[in-house]
Each structure stands twice: as structure tokens, then as C-alpha cells.
Image (cartoon, helix red, strand yellow):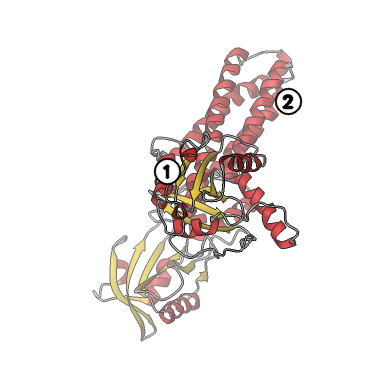
Amino acid sequence: MIPNLTDTICAVATAPGVGAIAVIRVSGPETMKLMEQVFRPHSRKSFSALKMRYAHFGVIRSRETVIDEVLCTLFCAPDSYTGEDSAEISCHGSALMQQQIMALLIGNGARIAMGGEFTLRGFRNGKFDLAQAEAVADLIAADSDAARDLALSQMRGGYSSRIKALREKLVNFAALIELELDFSEEDVEFADRSQLSNLLDELKDEIIALSSSFSKGNVMKSGIPVTIIGKPNAGKSTLLNAILNEERAIVSDIPGTTRDVIEDTININGFSFRFIDTAGLRDSRDTIETIGIERTVEKIRQAQVILHIFDISETNPDELQEEIDEFRNHLEDKSRRWILIANKTDRLETIPSVFKDLVELETVFVSAKRKENISVITDTLSRMVEKESVSDRTIVSNARHYEALMSALQAIEDVEKGFEMQVPSDLVAIDIRRALHFLGSITGEVTTDEVLGTIFGKFCIGK
């Protein structure tokens, strides 16, 4: 639901809880009038004499009762985050202070902002487009250097500029087709079909390049999924605990202890890795364990990296190869990065020579119990990810954008088919408009209140 954007709104912008300070934001047409009622600067200047975009020390008061000493920063439209008159109040972090100031603002005519309403107002007032607004949410949620860099790059508008350039080319294309429609009775052809065909190829190439970056962008944003697999009692949970350096999973000598997938995330050299401990694959009559095994198979298919752990003290190469073949049967993409973890080296005096040239796969020899060689695993994962600068690349990380790009690509391919089949220009124009619609939906040039409500409803209140 889209709120009334003509109201004056307020919200606590800092995280819930007690801290040294809290920030309360106000925005809307009555902001200055409202702040003049509740804020008294210590400088004794009149409110109208206060400089915009400067922090002013003073008190928040209700009539003559002082609620708190604060810093107040004023922003005059359009030079604010929302494009409206706005204010930010930095008060002491007491929950009581926050509640009393919010109650005072509401009592003087403001209402509590909805989730994402400040950013929505900025979008409506042309401060940024929809893709940049979504990047704000990504920046807030970023938990790695890669995710932060990607969100910042998109906030700066490079991605939006590329989408707009694509759309502009398509608009020029559409104009020529529409011109033919205006003179359809004269059978005039304004658009050179060979040039239009070349333009379509160019548009397709650019859209394919953007959409193909989604898998990388999604990984940078959400973390690289690493699934730990192996037979029961191979040491999967012990390995997970050793990598995370905490007792995250239950460890037991009883096979089948892990009956569901366990996930946790760590940051390695600026990238997030989502480690997933799975139930061991074996034939089981236990209903709960069987469900866990089914989820293990699902996680194997979703993983970008597989850590296949086995007990080197009890496994021979033939048995290991059978394990590998069994696990790989569940993979649709056989090219997934597969790393063997030879565990329980603490039980051996020396590593058997037969394992030193272990199959074709990369192998790391560890003792998860003693946390020996765990750093070799994390170093291997770190080297696997080449940290590319996103400042000079356009990378798609938003699923909504990816779907819109794929729909635009389909529409352009339909235009190509129309040319090949020599369909009338008015039918070709319909497919061009479809492509324009999908590209425009990414930046918000084409949108609906339902879409905006869904996007901004995911934002936190205060942003």
C-alpha cells in the first residue's frame, strides 16, 4: 500500500535498543513549522535564522518542559534525502527519550512513517531512480566488502545509466516503427530493416551480458553457498565448528546425529561464505533422518562449492571413488568446485602414499577435531574467489531486475521473429513496447503502486 505522501512523517532512524544517541527523522511540508514548535536553539537565534544543513545545539521541549538536549539538522527542499523539507534530531539514546520525542512530534501533527517511506519520497521527488533506491536497502543489509561495493556502485547510478541508455536506443527504434504506422496507407518504410536488425543484435548482446552477471552479483550480495557433505560420522559437524570457530553444530560419535541442514555465514577476505552442514547420505528407515537426507540432496544441487569430507583413517581409495560417484549423481552441473577434505589425520602416523595423488580432485588433509590445517581450507576458498572491482563493471544482483531483463530479452527476440516473418509494423510495435516496459520497470520509469508497495515495504522504518 502506498501511503499519503503529502503528510509530514517522523520515525526513529537508528536501530531499536539503548545507545549513546538515537536519530529521529522528520520529513514533509510541515517540517519547519513543526520543528519551530518543539526545538529551541541554545544560540537564542530565531528559528527562521538557523542555517540549513548545519547541526544546531538546543533542546526539545513540550511547552516549557525540556525533554532532552539535542543536535538538530535542518534541510530545505529540494536539498534533502527525500527532496522535501526535512530534519534530523540526534537525541540521547534512552528508549524513554525516543518515545517522548516521537509522541511530541505526533502530537504536533506528524504521523509515524511506514517502512521505506523516506526513500519512497526521495524516489517520487526524483532524487534517485528505483534501482538506486533498492541499492540503498542492499547497502543497509550488506555484510561483506563485496556486497557493500556492489550496492555503492549501484547507488551511484552507473547501472541505472546503462539501463536508461538501452531504453533510449529502443525508444529511437520504436519511433521509426511508429512513424511507419502513421503513414501506413502510403506504404512508406522509414526504418531500414538491416539497421534495425543490427540494433536488435546490439540490444540483445547488452541484455545478455547484464543478465549473465546475475549469478555473480547474487553471490556477491548473498554469499557463496558452500555445502559440507560426506558419509555419516565423517566429521562434517566438527569441520563446520572448526571453520566457524564456535560450537554451532552438535558433535557425536553416533552416526546420523545431524538430521537437518545447519547454516552459518563467515566473512573471508571481504566475501561472505554460507557454510551448510548436511545430514550424511545413507539408507535410513528413520523418517526424520530421511527428510534430512532429502534436504542434503537439495543443498548439494544449490551449492557453488562442495567440501566433501571423508575419514581418511577408515576409507580406501575405491570406497572414496564410490562416494564421489554417488554424490555426483545428485548434481545437475558437474562443473561445481569440488574440494576433498581428508579428515582425522590425527589418527594416522603418516598419510598413506596411495592418498597423496588422490583422484583428480583438490584435496586438503585436516584434523577437524584438533583444528589442524583449517586455515588451508579458508585460504583455498579465498583464492577461489577473484575479487573484482565493481566500480567499472555493471553487475546485476537484484532478482526483480534479472526477471525484467529476461522478459525484455524475450520481447526483443519476438521483434526479431516478427521481422523474419514480415509481420505488420503494428504487431512489431507491440513487442517493442513490451521491451520498453520491462526495461523501464527496473529504474521506475514504468511502475505501479503495487510494485512500489512491495519494494519499499521491505525497508526498515526510518529509511
Q: Amino acid at mark 1?
A: Thr
Q: 139 or 104: nearer the eye?
A: 139
Q: Residue furthest left?
A: 43
Quarter-wise, where is residue 243 in the image? Answer: bottom left
Q: Residue furthest bottom?
A: 65
Q: Position of residue 220 (x, y in %)?
A: 47, 45
Q: Earlier in the sequence, mark 1 or mark 2?
A: 1
365 left or right of 169 in image? left
322 left or right of 12 in image? right
Q: Amino acid at mark 2?
A: Leu
**Residue wearing tag 1:** 380
Q: 208 or 366: nearer the eye?
A: 366
Q: 196 or 227: nearer the eye?
A: 227
**Residue wearing tag 2:** 427
Q: 343 or 91: nearer the eye?
A: 343
Per the model, the C-alpha gap separating discs 1 and 2 is 54 Å
